[in-house]
Amino acid sequence: MADAVLLKIKSLMPNLSAKEQKIGRFILDDPRAASRMTISEMSSTLDIADSTVFKFTRSLGYNGFRDFRNNLLSEEFDPEISIHENVRPNDSSLDIAKKVFHSSATSLSDTLAMIREDDLEEALQFLTSARIVSFYGCGESAVVALDAYQKFLRSPISCHFIMDSHMQLMHASLTQPEDCAFVVTHTGVTKEMLTIARMVKSAGGKVIVITSYPNAKISEYADVTFVSTSEETGYRSESLSSRYPQLAIIDSLYTTLMFRNPNASESLSRIRTIISTTKEDH
C-alpha cells in the first residue's frame, strides 16, 4: 500500500504553520492537480516561497518535494469517497447509509495500515504488568474509554474508570509508578487529558494514547501512541467517525491479552456467571 499521504496531511494540519496549512488544504482539496505540479508551480499558485513548500514536504517525513509528489501520484484518488463522504442534501437515505458505511470501513482499513506490531506488543506489556490500568477520556472519547473499561473488566487485570473529568483528574493524581493510564483523545489537545497524561508520566507510570493527531502535544507524554484515522464530513463530526478505529484498536489489545493470559477464562467465567443472574428465565 502506498504511503497514506492525505492521511498524513490531515493528521499534521493542527501543528503546521499558517502557510503550511495553506499548502495542506490546497492538496486535500485537489490532490490530482497538486500531484501534477512542480514545486515552483505550486508555490506560484499559492503565492508562497519554494522553500516553504519544501519545508512542508519535510514535515511529512519525505526527503523533498519529488519524493512527496511520487507518493502522491501513486495513490488513487476519488475525492467523493476518499477525502470526504460528500453527503448531499438530495441523497436518498440508502445512498447516505452507503457513504457512511464506506467511510467507516475506510477509516478502519486506513488505521490498520498505520498500526505497528511493536506498539501493540509494548502496550500489551504495559497492560499486563500494571498494578492498575485506568481509562481516561472526555466527551465522546469518554464513551470509548468506558467501552474499553467494560471489556478489560472481563480480563484478569485490575482496571478503573470514572466518567466525571474532575474525578479523573483526582484519580490520576494518585498514580503510582506501577500504574498504566490508557488515554483516549481525538484531538490530543484536550486540557484535562493533557494534564492527566502529564501527571501519570511525572509519577513514573506508563501512558498509552489513542488519538487522531500523532503530533499533538499529548504524544510528548505517551509511551505508546496509536493513531486512529477518520474521514471528514459536514454531517457528522470527525471525532464520531474516528470512534470505530479507536474501538477496533481496543478490541485488538483486549483479544490478544485474553488469548495470552492463562487466567483469562477464570475471570471471564466469573463475569458471565454473575451477568447470567440478570437474565429472565425461559
Image: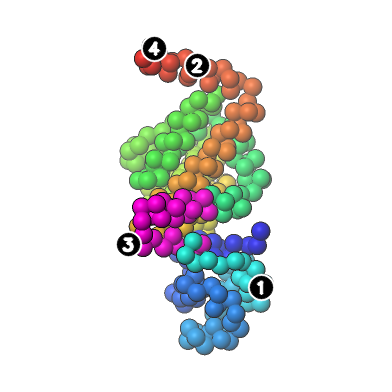
- Amino acid type assigned to the residue bearing label 2 in the image: Arg
Q: CA distance from mark 2 to mark 1?
A: 55 Å
User: Considering the numbered disc 3 on the image, is that residue within a helix, a strand or a loop?
Assistant: loop
Q: Amino acid at mark 3?
A: Pro
Q: Quadrant of residue 249?
A: top right
Report the span colored magenta. Answer: 82-106
Residue identified by numbered label 4: 282
User: Which residue: 40% across, 45% down?
Assistant: 141
Query: Are circles 4 and 3 on residues that touch, CB within 8 Å?
Result: no
Crowd band around label 3 with a 10 angstrom C-alpha radius: few (<14), some (14–19), many (20+): few
**Which of the two discs, 3 and 2, sits closer to the camera?**
3
Q: Earlier in the sequence, mark 4 or mark 2?
A: 2
Residue at 39% from the left image edge and 12% from the top image edge: 282
Left/right placement of residue 268 relative to residue 93 reads right
**Sequence order check: which comes first, mark 3 or mark 1?**
1
Tell me the residue that label 1 is attached to.
70
Mark 3 to mark 1 CA distance (whole Å): 36 Å
Mark with earlier residue (1, 4): 1
Question: Are there few (<14), some (14-19), or many (20+) residues within 10 Å of tag 2?
Answer: few
Q: Amino acid at mark 4?
A: His
